[in-house]
Image (tube, grey):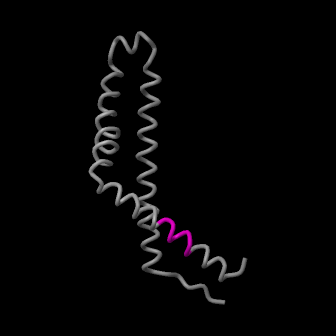
Amino acid sequence: MNKHDVLLSVENDTEEKIQMVEALERLEKNKDFQKVILDGYMRDEVLRANSLLANHTIKAQGKRTDIIEMLVAVSTFGEYLETIRALGASARYQKANPVSIEE
């Protein structure tokens, strides 16, 4: 791969990351996404599941592991969204401050 190809590849990757963060930003402004995902899943469901961890019946039935796995899944999804935001911010910075490759 020559320097031009490397630069083109970086530019394409940067644009993809910007497109992803822009799509996420549009989703986060959507009232249905806010209600179902951000509020319903990532907030309310986490609070409900967390309160179940102390429930004696849940403990007796050995279902705490299932609840913990659900909490891990929500956390993983939240981390995915944060990764999109971070990569998008970095890509926007790279686009605003391009690096030139001298031949």
Q: Main secondary structure of the magenta part?
A: helix
Q: Which image quadrant for residue 60?
A: top left
Task: Give whichever of 43, 32 is nearer the camera.
Answer: 32
Residue at the (60%, 85%) spot, across then down? 101
Q: Which residues are magenta?
A: 11-17
Residue at the (56%, 72%) spot, across then down? 12
Task: Give whichever of 14, 94 is nearer the camera.
Answer: 14
Q: In the picture provided, is 41 more to the left or to the right than 62?
A: left
Q: Quadrant of the C terminus?
A: bottom right
Question: Residue reaching furthest right?
Answer: 1
Query: In the rendering, at what x and y percent does residue 80 appear?
Result: 46, 50
Task: Give whichever of 36, 3 is nearer the camera.
Answer: 36
Q: Is residue 91 above or below residue 68?
A: below
Q: Is residue 78 magenta?
A: no
Residue at the (38%, 15%) spot, across then down? 58
Query: In the rendering, at what x and y percent does residue 59 appear?
Result: 40, 14
Task: Give whichever of 34, 84 is nearer the camera.
Answer: 34
Number of labels in the image equals: 0
Query: In the rendering, at what x and y percent does residue 70 appear?
Result: 44, 31
Query: In the rendering, at what x and y percent does residue 37 appear?
Result: 34, 43
Question: Residue reaching furthest bottom?
Answer: 103
Q: Is residue 72 above or below residue 80?
A: above
Question: Residue reaching furthest front?
Answer: 32
Q: Quadrant of the N terminus?
A: bottom right
